[in-house]
Image (spheres, rainbow, N blue to C red):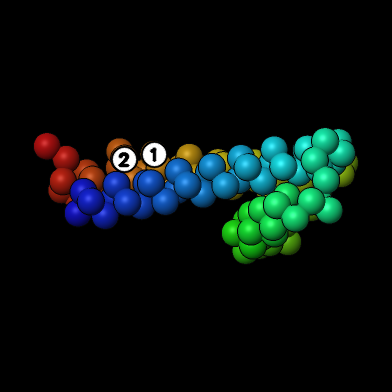
Amino acid sequence: MYALLATLSMVLQLVWLVFIIMIIMSWLIGFNIINTRNAFVSGLWRIVNQITDPILRPIRRVVPPVGGLDLSPIIVFIIIFFLQSFISRDLPQWLGLAG
């Protein structure tokens, strides 16, 4: 059971990392530091968006942009933090794994 919880926690950490990459890339593209006409940048941006859009889309339906600022990644970070805290602290106690 610990292996399953550790794997789930690792997957959440990877999702968190992909969102950090998405945010940094969006800033770099927005400030014209990197160019999406570059094949590598374009491919990486496409992959990152394919991973993050299914997660962000339902949140964006509920929470519209505020003053042009997309708050949905912040909400995803809060959800990931909650899930990681739950997995590491509460779930083992509920399952009787805490010693």
- Tag of residue 31: none
Q: Is residue 58 left or right of residue 35?
A: left
34 vs 54, nearest the viewer: 34
The answer to which quarter of the image holds residue 85 is top left
- Tag of residue 88: 2
Q: Quadrant of the C terminus?
A: top left
Would you call the spot at circle 2 few (<14 residues within 10 Å), some (14-19), or many (20 or more)?
Answer: some
Rendered residue at 19%/54% (across/down)? 1
Rendered residue at 26%/55% (across/down)? 4
Q: Secondary structure at mark 2?
A: helix
Rendered residue at 15%/48% (across/down)? 96
**Against 81, is 47 above or below?**
below
**Residue 25: where, in percent of width, then height?**
72, 42
**Residue 83: where, in percent of width, then height?**
43, 46
Would you call the spot at circle 1 few (<14 residues within 10 Å), some (14-19), or many (20 or more)?
Answer: few
**Against 43, is 86 above or below?**
above
Residue type, mark 1 in image? Ser
| Discs 2, 1 touching: Cβ within 8 Å | yes
Rendered residue at 69%/57% (across/down)? 43
Residue type, mark 2 in image? Ser
For this orientation, the residue located farthest to the left is 99
Residue of label 1: 85
Q: CA distance from mark 2 to mark 1?
A: 5 Å
Q: Is residue 59 left or right of residue 27?
A: left
Q: Secondary structure at mark 1?
A: helix
Q: Is residue 79 visible?
A: no
Q: Is residue 39 left or right of residue 55?
A: right
**Residue 97: where, in percent of width, then height?**
16, 46
